[in-house]
Amino acid sequence: MIELASVSKVFLGKRTVTALENVDLSISRGEMVSIVGPSGSGKSTLLNLIGGLDTASSGEIEIDGRRLSGLSDDELTRLRRDKIGFIFQFFNLLPTLTCQENVSIPLHLRGWPKKKIEERANELLNLVGLSPRREHLPDELSGGERQRCAIARALSVYPPVLLADEPTGNLDTHTGAEILALIRDLHERLGSTVLIVTHDIHVAESCARLVALRDGRIEEDRAGRLKYGVPGVPIHDPAETH
């Protein structure tokens, strides 16, 4: 589903910064993967490259069999629109639009008819448990409700790839656990490939697979340790029985 081959990203300026260096990564369809590492390790850069929000300095990235470097700007825009949903730490909701209107934005960009847009937006808000708040503005919502709205917007076309950049980073522990549980539930129901960039080791370990970056390179790639995503509560592994 997602393939990276010898991907590097170098930022040029007053000084040259190598954010990623010769990264090889393969993620299968339907996997839920966390990307972890200290600040400056290249986590968000990696997510931006996979999402087509930035371009690699070298190497190749493929999404669902399509090589990003071979796409025109219009083709890349369509791929992001049709294949990828983005969830951001700070929600990025438009403050003057209601929940329903924020969720509807990607559907308007696709040219859907008004009735179909309204039906899908209501379906998504119900999916994330936000139907009673559909007419509320972002400032009238709690942090968790704003993130639920942002998730509903990211899922507007039920994309095969969902990219989340610190989705719990701006939330308290309890609300963050709720949002993580929601993402996992949606992943299981929709079968999307999910990548989560996080500083929170409990969030990271709740995914089936954990990829750790350091200094722009993959330092570790292994299975996560939590089966059901309850922060701080490891699941007993029968193989560890003495």
Image (spheres, rainbow, N blue to C red):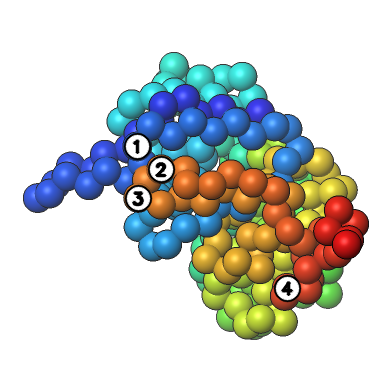
Per the image, label 4 sits on a secondary structure element best described as loop
In this view, the residue in front, 190 or 72, is 190
Q: Quadrant of the C terminus?
A: bottom right
Label pair 2/1, CB-CB below 8 angstroms: yes
The residue that disc 4 covers is 231
The residue that disc 2 covers is 217
Q: Amino acid at mark 3?
A: Asp
Q: Amino acid at mark 2?
A: Arg
Of callouts 4 and 3, which one flags the residue occurring earlier in the amino acid sequence?
3
Per the image, label 1 sits on a secondary structure element best described as strand
Place of residue 66 in the rendered image (x, y in percent of width and height, measured from the top left): 56, 20
Place of residue 59 in the rendered image (x, y in percent of width and height, measured from the top left): 39, 24
Q: Amino acid at mark 4?
A: Pro
Of callouts 4 and 2, which one flags the residue occurring earlier in the amino acid sequence?
2
Question: Is any part of residue 97 visible from this angle?
Answer: no
Report crowding for label 2: few under 14, some 14 to 19, many 20 or more residues within 10 A (C-alpha).
Answer: some
Please report the residue visible at 55 percent of the width from the left and 75 percent of the height from the top.
170
In this view, the residue in front, 24 or 96, is 24
- Mark pair 4, 3: CA separation: 27 Å
The residue that disc 1 covers is 21
- Mark pair 1, 3: CA separation: 8 Å
In the picture as drawn, the residue positioned furthest to the top comes out as 70
Of callouts 1 and 3, which one flags the residue occurring earlier in the amino acid sequence?
1
Of callouts 4 and 1, which one flags the residue occurring earlier in the amino acid sequence?
1
Q: Quadrant of the N terminus?
A: top right
In this view, the residue in front, 90 or 238, is 238
Label pair 1/3, CB-CB below 8 angstroms: yes
Question: Is any part of residue 172 visible from this angle?
Answer: yes
